[in-house]
Structure formats: C-alpha cells, structure tokens
Image (tube, grey):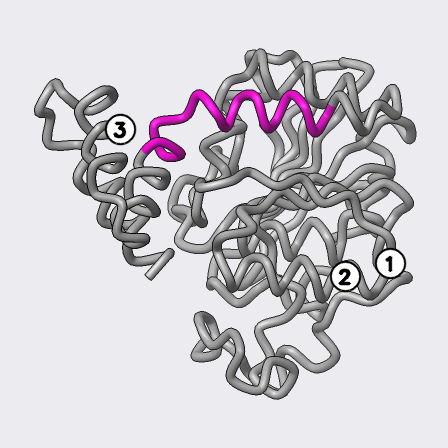
Amino acid sequence: MQTLYENDTIRVLYDPRGADISIVSFAHMRFSASETNSYWGQSAFEKAGFSAVGVICKTDTWYPAREVIPAIGALAACLPDANRIAYGFSMGGYGALRFGKAFGADIVFAVSPQISIDPRFWSGRDSRFSSYFDEELHENMRIEQDHLPDNVYAFYDPHHIYDRINVEALQTVRHVTGVTLHHMGHDTAEVFASSAMFRELCLLAVDGDQHGVAKLAKTTARASYRRKAGLAACAHLKKRPAMGDAIISKYFSDGGDWWPELYRRAIAEIG
C-alpha cells in the first residue's frame, strides 16, 4: 500500500494487483480517516483481485475541488488506462461522479449519490447534508455534464425520496443508467458487499452489458435482509399489517436483536 497524495482534507492510497480492471474508490462520510492503510471497499477489491486507488475525504466535506484536483496528477502513472471504474456510496458517490472521469475512469458506479449538497440548489427539497455546505469551499460543486464519462450507473431506491430526486436531477445533466434497488432505502451499498458479485458486476460493465449490470444488482438486492425489512415497513405504513407481519415472521423469526434496527431505519426513511 502506497500513499500517493495527502493534504489536510484528502488522502489517496494505491493498492496494486495487476488485474485488467482497476477501481478508483471514493469513501463515504464518517469513513475512519485514522486508518492510514485502509480505504473504502478494500476487502472486496482484494478478493476480486483488482488494483485500486482509494480516495478518502478525511473531513466529510464532499470532496471539495480545490483539495482533490492537486491529487489527480499523482495517479497518472499508476493504473492502466483502460477498464478503470470509479465507485462510491453517498458522499463517495458524489466523489465518483465529480472526479471519476478526472481520475481516468471510463465507468462510474454511483450508489445513492448526491448531485450537490448546496441548499440553494435544492430549495428545501433535500436538506439532509446542508449543514456540511460551505459556500467558499463548495463553489460550483454541482455535477455537470463534462464531469461525467459516457458510462455512468446510478444505483438507488426509488422509494427513498431524497435519493430518487438526486438521481432524477443527475439524469437531466446527462444520460445516466439508473438501476432501481427497491426497498433498500439509503443502505444500497449493502448490495455490493460480496466480492464475487462485485467482480461479476465490473466484468459486465466493462463488456458494456447494461442489462446484465442491472439484472445482477437487482437480483442481489432481492435477497437482502434490508430489502425484506423495507418491504415489511412499507406494508405496515400502507396499513397492510398482515403482510408486514408475515414478512417479519418468515425472515426475522429467529428473534435476534439485529433486525429491529433495519426495520427502524426502513420506517424512518419511508415515513
């Protein structure tokens, strides 16, 4: 593991393996900046055999351009030019959209991303991250057409209103392949946890198989316990308690203390 670049805000790590596919990973907010030899997605990339560059925003400030742009040159000689995929979730999804192309990616996997956190852009429609916005630091932060490569996938839950309106706004900027992962809420990154699944997803994307990418992601999501909790929550909120109770009884009957948190998050996000 090699540190390619670091300043007070950004750390860029290089983790080479020599595979034909390489990943540029952008960490989500609250990713531990104290772990100097760790980056988001590392375990999955190691098991998949992919070389990777891990970009970490140490201050949860949505990858401000003036801090990230100086790091781009440090990457130039490291990864092969072809089959480079930028990948990130939430704040990291924004980073992958905004800087994936600049880091040489020809494909972007943006998972529940934001197009901007500028409250002036949203006019109250999405204020989740407005407290992180700094007018000077985030000048012109909105994703624009020239930031994006030709192949962009946005994975999101259409029932999660804030994630949906961000992807809808992104699709007005440039054609983006939207992949809907129903009832996953903002926990869509769970779909990509398997290294075998992630490797197959990357191979499909490199082959240009958009249908295959969408099918694999949707199939994986359908098997997720987070989706089942989301389905139960949706049934209860729509006053169909028998259906919600049946889902809980079928999938969460072990009585463990882990599933109520999934259900609580699902209720909060849908409600």
Near-viewer residue (199 or 233):
233
Q: Position of residue 229 (x, y in %)?
A: 30, 36
> Mark 3 is on which residue type?
Ile
Q: Position of residue 100 (x, y in %)?
A: 77, 48
Q: Is the magenta stretch mostly helix, strand or loop?
A: helix
Mark 3 lies on residue: 247
Above or below — where is 213 with respect to 6?
Answer: above
Q: Does the magenta stretch include residue 161?
A: no
Near-viewer residue (271 or 244):
244
Residue at (54, 28) in percent of width and height: 192
Q: Position of residue 7 (x, y in %)?
A: 59, 59
Mark 1 lies on residue: 174
- Which region is colored magenta? 213-228
Residue at (80, 49) in percent of width and height: 176
Mark 2 lies on residue: 69
Classify mark 2: helix, strand or loop. helix
Q: Left or right: where does residue 199 sit relative to residue 263?
A: right
C-alpha gap between disc 2 and disc 1: 22 Å
Q: Mark 3 or mark 1, which is nearer the start of the sequence? A: 1
Residue at (76, 14) in percent of width and height: 18
Q: Tell me the quarter of the image containing the N terminus.
A: top right
Decide: few, some or many residues near mark 2? Use Cα within 10 Å; few <14, some 14-19, many ≥20: few
- In terms of image quadrants, where is residue 246? top left
